[in-house]
Image (cartoon, rainbow, N blue to C red):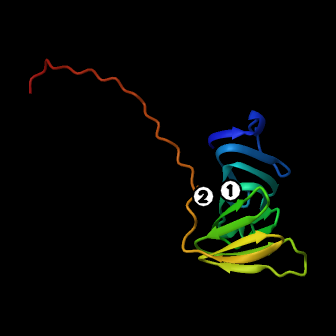
Amino acid sequence: AQNCKWHLDIPPTGDIHPGRSLQLEGGLVEIGFESGASIILQGPATLDLLTAKSARLRFGKLAAKVPKSAHGFTILSPEGKIIDLGTEFVMSVARDGATEVYWDKGEVQALGNKGDSQSPIHVKEKEGILLADGAVSRKSQDAVPTQFIRQITLPPIYAPRTLTLDFKASI
């Protein structure tokens, strides 16, 4: 975690289990799932933990790393869901639920909330998607937008040392 400000100043304590909602008002937190997937949640954001292989981003930004062992890792949003097939992606959900997803490599499936009659859309490298009004649309992209933080880098810790210089010795 880095510079976290939690809703009502109440940080999560102990093990975090499915059914828990994380409300981050500011800062960054990395969450590791038992499946091997991990996400960096960037505040302000609200994330519901559902299972070892799924979560719901109500609003905010996240960056996910999903190894092959976590194939099928799913992030739901108010407008649909993203099923990862082993890759890295970034995602943002606006307060109105509109969802944008981008990635550099690999493949994901996207499914809007319009119902079971809809087939998932397979999206590959260098494509982005927008989930809005229950539907999925493709967005072309040259690169993943830079407003997403993909790694928490902690500042270095400096340990002060006191040295005594002695100029009495000859060279």
Q: Residue at x 76, y 50 (%)?
A: 46
Residue ID for mark 1: 61
Q: Which residue is drawn at 90% across and 81% down?
A: 117
Q: Which of marks 1 and 2 is nearer the N terminus?
A: 1
Look at the picture and state if 160 lies above or below 157.
above
Q: Residue at x 86, y 51 (%)?
A: 19
In the rendered image, residue 67, in percent from the top left (x then y), is placed at 65, 66
Task: Kindly give the residue lying farthest to the top in the view shown.
Answer: 168
Q: Which amino acid does label 1 sit on?
A: Lys
Horizontally, is 13 left or right of 167 in the view?
Answer: right
Instruction: Give the structural element (helix, strand or loop) at label 1.
Output: strand
In the rendered image, residue 164, in percent from the top left (x then y), is placed at 27, 20
Numbered label attached to residue 148: 2
* Front one among 49 and 79: 79
Horizontally, is 92 left or right of 117 in the view?
Answer: left
Look at the picture and state if 105 lies above or below 151.
below
Q: What residue type is labelled 2?
A: Phe
Residue contact at pointers 1 and 2, CB within 8 angstroms: yes
Q: Give the Cα separation between the discs numbered 1 and 2.
A: 7 Å
Location of residue 144 (image quadrant): bottom right
Horizontally, is 91 left or right of 49 in the view?
Answer: left
